[in-house]
Image (spheres, grey):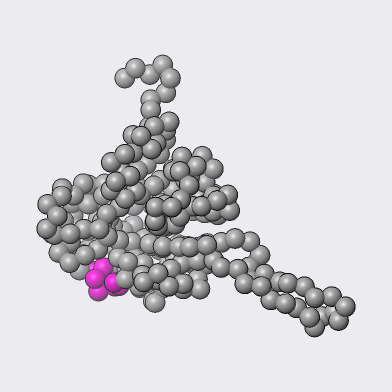
Amino acid sequence: MMQEAPFAEQVLPIALRRLVRFTVDSGETVGEEDLLIDAPGIEEVASACAAIVLTREGEARAKTLLAAGARYLFLGEAALRDSECVARLAEAYPGRIGIFAPVRRQRVTWTLETESNADFRTLTPSIAAPTWEILLADGRESGVVLPWWLQAMRERGASQFLVQADLRDDSDLNILAELVEMVGERLWIAPLGPNHLPYVEWVKYGQCCQLALPDDDYRRKEELFAEFLSPPSGDTT
């Protein structure tokens, strides 16, 4: 039976979280369902939020935050550098370690094949179908495709996956739907930038019901997700 992360309580029909970068002097209240991107001084609120996202830092930083009371951690680039750190942390802190993966559609390159048949020349794509590639913390391509990586990290003990992507067309929606089918309620999806399809399409056609939103969008959640958050017809409560 799947072990859910501490913050993964469902809010039917969809679950929404706020994904923000923490700053000590912002004066903003941290919510118990917030996902905070790691920054200096976050130890002060480690136990107050749902999870902390480590975009670059690794095992030592993770242990520091867990000791400070962090309920859950998402590891980013550090897991790409040393995948075994995921296994070590997951064993030491069961149910509290996940994977953060910013992604972009993998670029397709074409190769002109001329050797197998002298009478024909064919162009061969580098990938058979559209897929997402994980980005490093500085935005560079890692060469690691997301579906394979999530499965590998799941086998090492990661219990949740926070994927940051911009869904721009039907191909992206299909990729998302396949990920949902693969990992189910372990998956959270967040926008990478402002240029993406409406969130409603993420839910309807990408089949994703767990979203982490930037602050401005989270404040507008009743507007952006009105048809999902409204009570059923006839329900006056």
Task: Tell me where residue 26 sits by quadrant.
Answer: bottom left
Q: Residue at x 71, y 71 (%)?
A: 124
Question: The C terminus appears in which quarter of the rendering?
Answer: top left
Relative to 173, is 234 above or below?
Answer: above
Residue 61 sits inside the magenta stretch: yes
Residue 79: x %, y % from top left: 38, 71
Q: Nearer the viewer, residue 126 or 177?
A: 126
Q: Residue at x 26, y 68 (%)?
A: 62
Relative to 82, is 225 above or below?
Answer: above
Q: Nearer the viewer, residue 196 or 157?
A: 196
Q: Residue at x 39, y 56 (%)?
A: 193
User: Is residue 155 at all visible to an observer of this figure?
Assistant: no
Report the side of 113 relative to 167 (left or right): right
- Count how many numbered circles sit on residues in the image: 0
Residue 164 sits inside the magenta stretch: no
Residue 230: x %, y % from top left: 38, 28
User: Is residue 197 at all visible to an observer of this figure?
Assistant: yes
Residue 92: x %, y % from top left: 30, 67
Task: Tell me where residue 101 sits by quadrant.
Answer: bottom left
Q: Name the outermost residue toward the front.
A: 195
- The stretch of residues the image draws in magenta is 57-63
Task: Tell me where residue 55 sits by quadrant.
Answer: bottom left
Q: Does the magenta stretch mainly form a helix, a strand or a loop?
A: helix
Residue 157: x %, y % from top left: 40, 63
